[in-house]
Image (cartoon, rainbow, N blue to C red):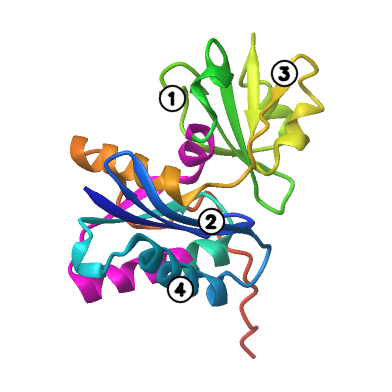
Amino acid sequence: MIVLALDTSTSACSAAVWRDGIVLARRLEAMARGQSEALMPMVRAVLTEAGMAMGDLGLLAVTVGPGAFTGLRIGLAAARGLSLASGLPLAGVSTPEAVVAAVPQAGRRGRTVLAVIESKREEVWVQAFAGDTLAPLAPVAALLPERAAALVAGPVLVVGDAAARVLALLPDAVAASQPGWPDAAVVAALAAEHWAAGTALPPDPLYLRPADVTLPQCR
């Protein structure tokens, strides 16, 4: 299966073309803003590098969060538009799973892996996984760092763009060396696996709290 995957859910922008375990083309750039301008040129670049057209693809994939509200909307809107125009199916992948899956198996073996995603608020988005199997140990949640740290015990590996906010509370934990944002190449591999198993997430944003919007007062 050939998969085109997108990610704009955190502080980066990424696109990749993946085929049966091989990354044919990949772009990833850290950016707090500007994903809306950067994403589609990245998509065109990876398709060109991989020598693929939309008709060659079998699946589209996108991260669904939790993450930055604006970033999630950018990635999901682009993925839905591509799916609608091409008729290709679209699979969602959670941001914490994509972040954790980027850690090599040797680095997470025998540990609990704690994904900690920045929310730009007091809470962080957090989810714990079994390092050996990547099985989630609890649902993703919005928690204060102190409560997030209390989720895990024993050997712990912390990964994510807000990892530092929890590592300070876990003196025996180890920080992952991988960047704390999803890689579209990993998203593609996860999407293909979940699609084959019938466990892919719907392409809908995974919001854990309302958007920070102030409605105008009616007079």
Q: Amino acid at mark 4?
A: Met
Say which mark, if any, is on residue 9: 2
Of 93 and 185, nearer the camera is: 185
Count neighbours of disc 3 (C-alpha within 10 A) and say few if under 14, some if 14 to 19, many if 20 or more.
many
Q: Position of residue 169 (x, y in %)?
A: 79, 24
Q: Earlier in the sequence, mark 3 or mark 2?
A: 2
Q: Amino acid at mark 3?
A: Ala
Say which mark, if any, is on residue 158: none
Q: Amino acid at mark 1?
A: Leu
| Residue of label 3 | 173
| 159 lies left or right of 205 | right
- Tell me the residue at 52%/49% (across/down): 66
What segment carries the magenta color?
75-101
Q: Earlier in the sequence, mark 1 or mark 4?
A: 4
The answer to whether residue 148 is above or below residue 8 is above
Q: Earlier in the sequence, mark 3 or mark 4?
A: 4
Viewer-side label of 2, 4: 4
Kindly state the secondary structure of the residue where label 4 is placed.
Answer: helix
Q: Which part of the image, by quadrant, shows the C terminus?
A: bottom right
| Residue of label 1 | 134
